[in-house]
Image (spheres, rainbow, N blue to C red):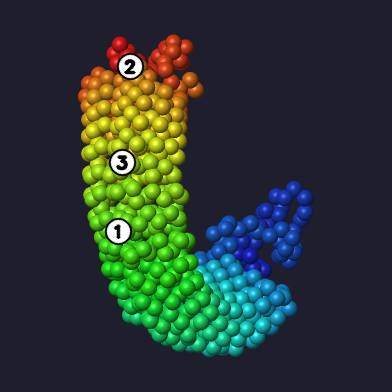
Amino acid sequence: MPRQRSFTITETFRGKTLLPIIDINLQRVRSSGRGLKFNSLPDVTAACRNKSPIASPAARKSVFLQDENGRKISLSKKRRIKRLDGAKTILESKGESLVDLSSMGLDSLATEIGYLSDAVELYLYENKLTALPPQIGCLKKLQKLWLQENSLAYLPDELEQCSAITHLDLRHNKLEGPFPGAILSLKNLRQLLLTYNRLTDLNGIGELKALQTLVVNSNNLQGCVPDCIGELANLQTLDLSKNRLTHMTEEIKNCSMLKRLLVDYNQIRELPSAVGNLSELTILGIKYNCLTELPNELISCTKLTEVNTEGNEIDHLPEEMLARMPQVTSLNLSRNMFRQLPSQDPRQYSQLKRLALDNNALEEIQTDIFEQATQLSLLQLSNNNIRILHGNVCYWKSLIELDMSYNQLDQLPDTIGELTNLEKLELTNNRLQSLPKSIGRLIHLNYLELEFNQICWLPSEIGDLEQLRVLNLDANRLPRLPTAIGKLANLVQLKLADNLLQRLPPQIAFRIKSPNFSNLMPTNLNYNLTQGLPRYKITLVAPLEKKSLEPIRQSVKEGSNIITTMLKAQNSILQ
């Protein structure tokens, strides 16, 4: 069998197999208009070197072969895979103290990395690295190594030689199993970030005595936080959130410098009393665990500014806890089992700015205990069983947001009008039948949510809410709206579906896209008793004048059937 020969479309012409191609190129050259004459093959070849044949994109990616029968066949070229290892950039960075190889799409790291003996900071984040070469150990001066967002499954033993490293970022990699032994030799390490890996334990972590920040959230840590964590006397931030931890070690008491302790989204059933030794603690995150109570010793953490216990089974707080923690400004007790507000000592709310007690089992609110809550700006009480507000709500005068949705309120106190700083009031899904006239004094109110109540009457004072932008009255029992509602010039959304409306006041008209009308978000009158109204979306506009109808008349003249229908319906309503 004769050996097959191959060539590409751009090869130097050779052999008889290319004669047809030469004939084609000969014609091209002769037709170029230069008046040249060619009498021999060498002449043509020389000319073609100066004027290469035009190949299609498909041809440039193909290889032409000749089979045993002399037939020409074409095969696609196999694209040479070019591996990116950053060798060129590495060599160019030799002698530099800061080397940036981030976001280069590197799938491997060139062995030349060992030449960067002067590097102090090395950025390798956002690549496709699956391993580090042994030569990484040659970087004796390296202090900061950023490896986040790669696909590293292990760390080489040679990393131990980089003993000067103080900051190591390995977030979003594929490290799994026991804690990497190579890290335990980095005795100068102060910051270690391991978020989004698959580590199962922290054994040996106590060897990193200089560690100040340890973040190992979103891994597969299980069981008890190891006792060796207590050997990290310099630790200031410990984040073990989103794992499967069930217990916190008593040795945590030795982390006396700890300022942030975050163990959210675990399965911890009890906090040890030793947590009271953390006198520098400012933030405690324990949400979504299985806690039934907080230790009394917690009141010794007088520097706490934020406590979040959301998503546990707690029904009370330690006696005078908040009163003993004067710096706590944010307290989240949502989704627990509180049946009454924590403690009756008014002092405990004096420093609070945000209090969340939604999704509990509260049945009544004694507003008097907020007597000293002069800084409270956010109060969330939704999804409880609150039937009545006892006392004077004027103690909530500093509130900007009040959420009492999904309760069983059947009325609001007249003193609600004293909450003059209120910007957002949510009362969705209660049993309200009306609103007090004092509602009109909420001059800064932007949002008023009243859907799914039993409201059958609105006071005309609602028109005094000059800053109101959203008014939700869906699913009530309103037979009519007060004409004063037309004064709400800043309103951008009005919801009226599922009421008993039969007629609309003159201040309400159909939404028409015209500069003469206010540009408000549309709503509808579906599920009302407005038989004469078509199911078009409507909106609030300024009081109608004859001149404002001129654009509509013009549209009607141009043959707009929709506008005609809308005008007829409007006339029947405004009569």
Q: Residues within 10 Å of mark 3 (few under 14, many from 20)?
A: many
Q: Is residue 240 left or right of residue 98?
A: left
**How far is mark 2 from mark 3, CA to CA?**
32 Å
Which quadrant would residue 23 be assigned to in this image?
Answer: bottom right
Above or below, 554 relative to 189: above
Label disc, if present, on residue 427 of the rendered structure? 3
Q: Is residue 268 left or right of residue 65?
A: left
- Residue 293: % across, % down: 30, 68
* Front residue of 552 and 324: 324
Above or below, 536 relative to 264: above
Secondary element under disc 3, as helix, strand or loop, is: loop
Task: Tell me if residue 229 can be seen.
Answer: no
Question: Which residue is tagged 1?
Answer: 335
Secondary element under disc 2, as helix, strand or loop, is: helix
Q: Earlier in the sequence, mark 2 or mark 3?
A: 3
The reply to whether dot 1 and dot 2 touch (C-beta < 8 Å) is: no
Question: Which residue is tagged 2?
Answer: 570
* Front residue of 520 and 299: 299
Task: Tell me if residue 574 can be seen.
Answer: yes
- Residue 432: % across, % down: 25, 36
Residue pictured at 35% horizontal, 20% vertical: 483
Q: Is residue 291 left or right of residue 547?
A: left
Above or below, 355 relative to 294: above
Residue type marked 3: Leu
Q: Residues within 10 Å of mark 1 (few under 14, many from 20)?
A: many
Residue type marked 2: Gln
**How far is mark 1 from mark 2, CA to CA?**
49 Å
Which mark is nearer the camera, 1 or 2? 1
